[in-house]
Each structure stands twice: as C-alpha cells, then as structure tokens.
Amino acid sequence: MKFVRENPQVVKNNLERRGDEAKIPLVDELLENDRRWRTLRTEADTLRSRRNKLTEQIAQARRQGQETMRLVKEAEQIPDKVKTLENESADLDQKVANTLMQLPNLIHESVPVGKDENDNVEVRKWGKPPEFDFKPKDHIDLTTQLGLVDLERAAKVAGARFYYLRGDLVKLNYALIRLALDFCEMKGYKLAQPPYLLRREAVGGAVALSDFEDVIYKIEGEDLYLLATSEHALLAQHMDEILDGKNLPLKYGGVSPCFRKEAGAHGKDTKGIFRVHQFEKVEQFVFCKPEHSWDEHEKLIANAEEFFQMLRIPYRVVNVCTGDLGTVAAKKYDLDAWLPGQGNYREVVSCSNCTAYQAVRSKVRFRDRPDEPTKWVHTLNSTLVATERTLVAILENYQNIDGSITIPESLQVYMGGATKIKPAT
C-alpha cells in the first residue's frame, strides 16, 4: 500500500501498458479508502489520548473535591466512539487488502506490449527441426498405433482430457522425472515433494485467485485445493517467515502431479495428452535477494534450455508479451518445443520472475542481521519439465518410418538401456 500511495501514476501506467485499463479506477478507489482508513485511525488515537487526559483530570478533580460529572460523562462515551471508528477502519482495511489483491505485478521494462501469444517476441532458437523421409505423424496417431495412450477408457472413468499411459510410455514418463531430479541436484537445488492439497491462504499467496479460481480444483466442503503446480506449495512453505539473508538464494526442485481444469481452453488440443487435466512436472523455485533476481531469472531459463538440449529437442525461447503475461509475473520467458506433427512450436516451459509480488502476499521477508529491518524477498519459478507435453515432443521428434520411437540418449540409462519404445502389449 505504501508503494501505491507514493507511486499512483506508476501503478496506473502499468495497468495501461498491460491493457488492463478497466482496473485503473481501482487505484483512485484504493487511495481514497487508504486515506479514510488513516483518518479514522488518527481519530481513534486522538480519542484514546483524550480519554487518558480525562482520566487524569477526573482523578485530580476528585482529590480537590471538585465536581466530575461532566468529565466522567465525556469519558464514558469515548469507548463506544473508538469501537465505531475501529469497526469502520477494519472494514476499510479489508477493502484495501481486497483491492490490492486485484492489482497485477509491475511489468519489467523489457516486456513487449501485445495482446496475446501471437505477440510474444522470439529471443533465440536452438536446434534444427528434424527432416523426415516420410510425412511425420502427430503424437495422437503415434500413440494410437503403438497402444501407448488410452483416451477412451480414461474418458469412461474420468471424463475428457484424462488418459491412461501404457507400457514403455509409463517408463519414459518416469525416466524424464528421474533425469530432471538428477539435473536439479546437479545444479544445487534442494529436492522437495510437496503436499498435493493446499489451503486457500497458501494458494492466494501465489496467485490472484480472482484470475485463477476457474483453473484449480476445489475440494467440496473443505478449505483445500488440488495442487495446480508445485510452485504454489514451494512458495507457501515459507509464508509468514523471515529468512536469513546469509542463506539466500534458496533453490528448490519440486516434483508433483498437477491438476488443472483448463477452463477457457475449449477447442484447443482436445485430443491427445498435450493439454490435460493432470500431468507431472518438475519445477524450479527460487527465493533470492531483490538485487539478484534478474540474474536468477536468466539462470532458470538457461537450466530449462540445457535440459531440452540434453533431450536434443529443437526449441525457441520467447519473451512473453503484456497480454499473455498474467497477473503475477514481472517478466516471463516461454520455451516452445518444435512439434513436427503440428509443424509448429508449442509451449513446454514457463519461466517467471515474480519479483516481490508473491512475497508480499505470502509475507516472506529476509534480513542479513537481527538488528536490520526486514525486506521482501523476490521469488522466481520455472518449469524444468512438464512430462506429458515433453513426451509429445519426444514422440514426434524421434519417430521412425516403421512407427517406432527412438529413446533420447540421455534417457536410455533410466529405461534399462532400451533404445526404442515398443508397442504396449
């Protein structure tokens, strides 16, 4: 609130740049509620001070045998007035908090302005799309041919956008996870398998629930949500804490299933396993000092690139535009893998610097010495591998004319030395 109070035009300009002009009036509403809140608090403090003085005057008058009825009557009215002011200020305080929760993070100056993913700006490419002596198939045809995915039976038991993985594709899925976990350890990340259910407070510290509510699954009758990404749990583990600055950065490699409604994705990737309601993911998460967060952001995307280079999957990195950025990130890179079956690059990694946005919401601070004031940490997150989408990329890039799939060399050790995926039996 202090930042908004001192920089209202910066906040308004940020909303305009994001194309979120509808929220600009919220800034003036926020400032007015904050002004009223501070006025009420001052009035309440003034009344408390007045009551203390009256108490002294009453005691002095009684010692001197003077009449005290007028002073007593005034003093007796003050507690009710203070309570009324406190109730009004509490309501305003809640309104201020609710409005702040609706305002997005401040965008970094390097973020391109645009409406949607079509306006994302390519930063670099790696690898050449493979050339085939045959017309490449998409992963749906490949997995159907090899019996590696069963969508019909999954739809029977769970509905659309669910799946059964079969045979070697199950092994390949866990091979990706094993490779990713070993990679995280090699890079100095602490491995964590978080709870798969989170309380609303924990989720609300990571995202703007007003934007995210239609994406996550709520457990009926309980204050619990299914995990949408381990990012949320990795952040929440330190909520309401003051971290020791000497231990920063803290780097975690989280592994978990992820559950998402995919609301708003109707008609997009309705077949296959590219866009589904559940998937596995190994996530990188960093708590760091503010002066280091932009360096850490580049390290995170570099790690993701190194991982996909190990898989030898062609990709491009894009700087995500304002209209595709979302509420939480100040800047985001996407890594898009080449999918021969679609003849297009598709997102498989999202890498965000959230600066202090999540830290403020989750109350995660740090200090270097006990006698120093606390500061907000910066938080960053990046996919290392979302396995189902990456399976799609492997299937399509490593397909052979006979319908078999070559296993990337970096995964073969986790597949018992196998070099090709066999049909499921």
Image: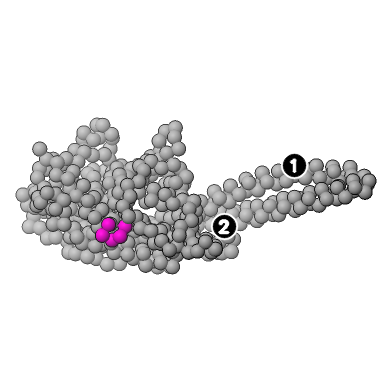
Answer whether residue 256 is visible to the viewer in this image: yes
Residue 1's tag is 2
Taking the image as shown, residue 274 lies to the left or right of residue 36, namely: left
According to the picture, the residue beneath numbered tag 1 turns out to be 80
Range drawn in magenta: 185-189
Seen at 43% across and 43% down, the residue is: 213
Label 2 CA crowd tier, 10 Å (few <14, some 14–19, many 20+): few
Residue 413: percent from left, percent from top: 14, 53
Q: What amino acid is found at the position of numbered circle 2 in the picture?
A: Met
Seen at 43% across and 49% down, the residue is: 236
Chief secondary structure of the magenta span? loop
Seen at 93% across and 49% down, the residue is: 64
Q: How many marks?
A: 2
* SS state under label 2: loop
Residue 366: percent from left, percent from top: 48, 60
Mark 2 to mark 1 CA distance (whole Å): 29 Å
Mark with earlier residue (2, 1): 2
The relative height of residue 314 versus residue 73 in the rendered view (above or below) is: below
Seen at 18% across and 58% down, the residue is: 311
Instruction: Specify the quadrant that holds the C terminus.
Output: top left
